[in-house]
Amino acid sequence: MTEAVLELRDLHVTYRAAGVDVPAVRGVDLTIGPRDTLGLAGESGCGKSTIAGAVLRLLPRATRVEGEILLEGQDVLKLRPGKVRAVRWTTAAIVFQGALHSLNPVQRVGDQIAEAIETHARTRSRRTTTARVGELLERVGLPARRRREYPHQLSGGQRQRVLIALALACEPALLIADEPTTALDVMVQAQVLSVLEDLQRDAGLALLFITHDLSVLRSSCRRLAVMYAGRIVEEGPSGAVFDEPRHPYARALASAFPTIGDPASRYRPSGLAGDPPDPTALPTGCPFHPRCPVVVDDVCPSLDVRLRPAGPAREAACVHVGGDDDG
């Protein structure tokens, strides 16, 4: 059996704020195999980006992380700091949302990519490194000459491409894309998505794609996982989860986006009443029950349902999901 590139086992992440424990991730299990693509969706504050930070140990020092994070079989939580630095970029790399905030504004973009290469491959000559930088930029659709420019001289989409090139500098096995298209307009967003899809296919990367936009994940990922209040509430093949969601929250997310080409799509988008729960005061039972349109009043406020079979290769955490033959 092929070893998973990333495996999360009962992952818990708790922040400490003003003397109060804030649970951000509560018992998440996920697996991404070689060349696999997993989309992670949910509203702001559900724990998506916290998972990304936990995988590469980028969270604040006061954060408590429990469980297991296995990168190619190594538990990241047990690695010494020096070994963690070696794992970043080489085994797993991340593309952040805000390229302008992620890149050094007073350093040329080519030098920033070269720094990552030289840090993890010290035997490379400067000439070889420069050639590699140009190759990476061309790989993401930018001319090699743009390596001499500063971040402010590039458009938002071009800066995002630079971040992707930077993440690919040391040929990682896993690429984490954390809201990489949120700040971009629709046309540029489509271009960046196309770059990611081509790179994932051609380089054989495993991809963890994080966004609130379920429709983007539907077309970009083989599998989808939907998060709510720090937990996975539904997981399965992307087409099945988007087109026929079993958890009411996943259904609400899917209903928020129109279907292009569907004459009735303008009537389809709908909102979801209420707000995500305060993580320091989570509801009893199912955390979604205060907002759920199909809540069972005498069950959901007291029964904390975990993931259960919801059809072929999929699971959902809902009392309305019956079992193995549920379809």
Image (tube, rainbow, N blue to C red):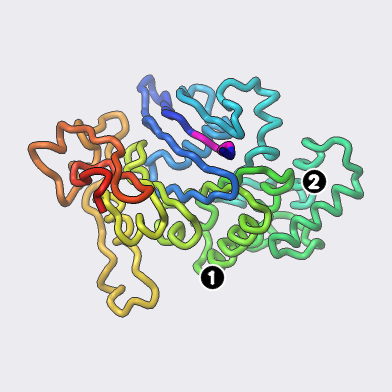
Q: Main secondary structure of the magenta part?
A: loop
Q: Which residues are magenta?
A: 3-7
Q: On the image, which quarter does residue 78 sit in?
A: top right
Residue 202 falls left or right of residue 132 = left
Q: Helix or strand or loop: what does disc 2 sit on?
A: helix
Q: Helix or strand or loop: what does disc 1 sit on?
A: helix
Q: Amino acid at mark 1?
A: Met
Query: Residue at coordinates 71% horizontally, 46% vertically from top-left?
Result: 171
Whether residue 42 appears in this view of the structure is no
Query: Exactly how many numbered labels are in the figure?
Result: 2
Seen from this angle, which residue lies furthest left? 298
Q: Does 280 appear above or below 271?
A: above
| Residue hosting label 1 | 187
- Circles 2 and 1, Cβ within 8 Å, touching? The answer is no
Question: Residue 90: image x %, image y %?
Answer: 70, 38
Q: Amino acid at mark 2?
A: Ala
| Residue hosting label 2 | 114
